[in-house]
């Protein structure tokens, strides 16, 4: 069963027949996590680095922001038995799509937000597909643990 993770959304699952997918990661960041022992995966698609930009929006849509979405992604997978130290972690996105001149640098700011959070919590990504000026799609297959990044029609199994 394919479960679509929309913009400013997150899903986690331990169901073998589930495939989590998020489309069109431009300046947004997609974080895919998978615990091969527990066979649990989660996928977050966040838009902005910091909920301080709009605290009211963060209350309604916590997955819109890195600082409120990332902790919830991990906590949700823990409910299914995942453990941080066993997780495969993939980051994708952070591109300059609509901001070709780099005026707002949303992609870079989004990436730096997650890297700071990971550093503070001793978390390391196993694979990163960050930057450039392309959209990316991320897929996690819960039964196998395959994490796939699709860019411009090409698929690459990265974890």
Image (tube, grey):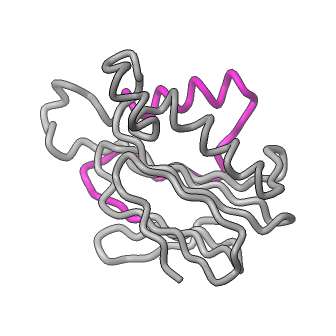
For this view, does 18 lie left or right of residue 100?
right
Q: Quadrant of residue 136?
A: bottom left
Count of numbered labels shown in the rendering = 0
Q: In the image, 148: left or right of 136?
A: right
Magenta span contains residue 98: no
Q: Residue at x 29, y 71 (%)?
A: 152
| Quarter occupied by the C terminus | bottom right
User: In the rendered view, would you say 85 is above or below 159?
Assistant: above
Using the rendered view, name the quadrant where residue 117 is placed: top right
Tell which of 137 and 64 is nearer to you.
64
Q: Find residue 101 and report its horizontal and vertical position in percent.
A: 13, 32
**Vertical position of residue 65 compared to residue 24: above or below:** above
Q: Is residue 113 magenta?
A: yes
Residue 88 or residue 11, whichever sits in front: 11
Q: Position of residue 86 (x, y in %)?
A: 83, 52
The percent coordinates of residue 148 (x first, y second) are 53, 70
In the shown orientation, is residue 42 left or right of residue 57? right
Which stretch is magenta? 108-137
* Residue at x 72% of width, y 36% of height: 123
The structure residue drawn at horizontal position 68% and vertical position 21%, both measured from the top left corner, is 120
* In front of the other: 6 or 118: 6
């Amino acid at each position: 069963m394919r479960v679509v993770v929309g913009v400013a959304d997150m899903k986690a699952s331990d169901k073998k027949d589930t495939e989590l997918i998020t489309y069109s990661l431009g300046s947004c960041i997609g974080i895919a996590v998978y615990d091969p022992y527990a066979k649990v995966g989660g996928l977050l698609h966040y838009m902005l680095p910091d909920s301080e930009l709009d605290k009211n929006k963060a209350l309604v849509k916590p997955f819109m922001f890195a600082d409120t979405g990332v902790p919830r992604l991990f906590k949700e997978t823990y409910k299914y038995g995942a453990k941080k130290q066993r997780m495969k972690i993939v980051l994708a996105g952070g591109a300059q799509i609509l901001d070709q001149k780099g005026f707002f640098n949303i992609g870079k700011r989004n990436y730096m937000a997650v890297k700071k959070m990971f550093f503070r919590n001793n978390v390391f990504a196993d694979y990163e597909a960050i930057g450039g000026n392309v959209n990316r799609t991320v897929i996690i297959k819960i039964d196998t643990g395959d994490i796939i990044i699709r860019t411009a029609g090409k698929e690459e199994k990265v974890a």
